[in-house]
Image: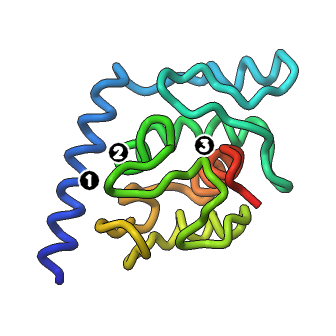
Amino acid sequence: MRRNWSAFVAMFAVTALAACAGEGGQAGEEAPDTAATEAPTTQAPTTGAAPAGQPPAGATAEMVAAGQQTFNTVCVACHGPDAKGTQLAPDLTDQEWLNTDGTYEGIISIVTNGVPQPKQHPSPMPPMGGASLTEQQVRDVAAYVWSLGGGK
């Protein structure tokens, strides 16, 4: 079992690095600056990303935008650029939640703890998608995922 987990982590790291290489470097601070000068919006201009919606209670449009950036560097490898899922991970834009209840706090818990034994997909999700995320980044990416329309 340990060998399978190691192989998954290695595969995820290679896939994540390849996805990051295609972005041409890290995105700057443009989204927060724009949000500060204009009416808050949740649709960041990131190519290929699923459009964000309204933030959950306890989150802000700025958190959703920051979460979209984190999603596009960490989560996209398994959930896809449109967050509609892949063979490795589920669709995050529909109303069906497989491993959580779909609440903002439930999504935070999944991002924090991962999914060691997914109900319908072959690959486990490591805690924080295998990245080292801060508590704020976890809350931000959970706000983005919730905003995609499937959050309860």
Q: Residues within 10 Å of mark 3 (few under 14, many from 20)?
A: many
Task: Give 145 or 130, whichever is nearer the viewer.
Answer: 145
Q: Mark 2 or mark 3: which is in front?
A: 2
The amino acid beneath tag 3 is Gly
Q: Give the distance between the C-alpha atoms of the residues marked 2 and 3, in whole angstroms.
A: 15 Å
Q: Are marks 1 and 3 in contact (CB under 8 Å)?
A: no
- Residue drawn at x 54%, y 70% is 98
Badge 3 is on which residue? 67
Q: Secondary structure at mark 3?
A: helix
Give whichever of discs 2 and 1 has the lower sequence position.
1
Badge 2 is on which residue? 77
The amino acid beneath tag 2 is Ala
Badge 1 is on which residue? 12
Q: Is residue 3 above or below residue 57?
A: below
Image quadrant where residue 57 sits: bottom right
The amino acid beneath tag 1 is Phe
Q: Are marks 2 and 3 in contact (CB under 8 Å)?
A: no
Q: Are marks 2 and 1 in contact (CB under 8 Å)?
A: yes
Give whichever of discs 1 and 3 has the lower sequence position.
1
Query: Is 49 on the left-hand or right-hand side of 146?
Result: left
Q: Give the distance between the C-alpha atoms of the residues marked 2 and 1, in whole angstroms.
A: 7 Å
**Quadrant where the image shows the N terminus:** bottom left
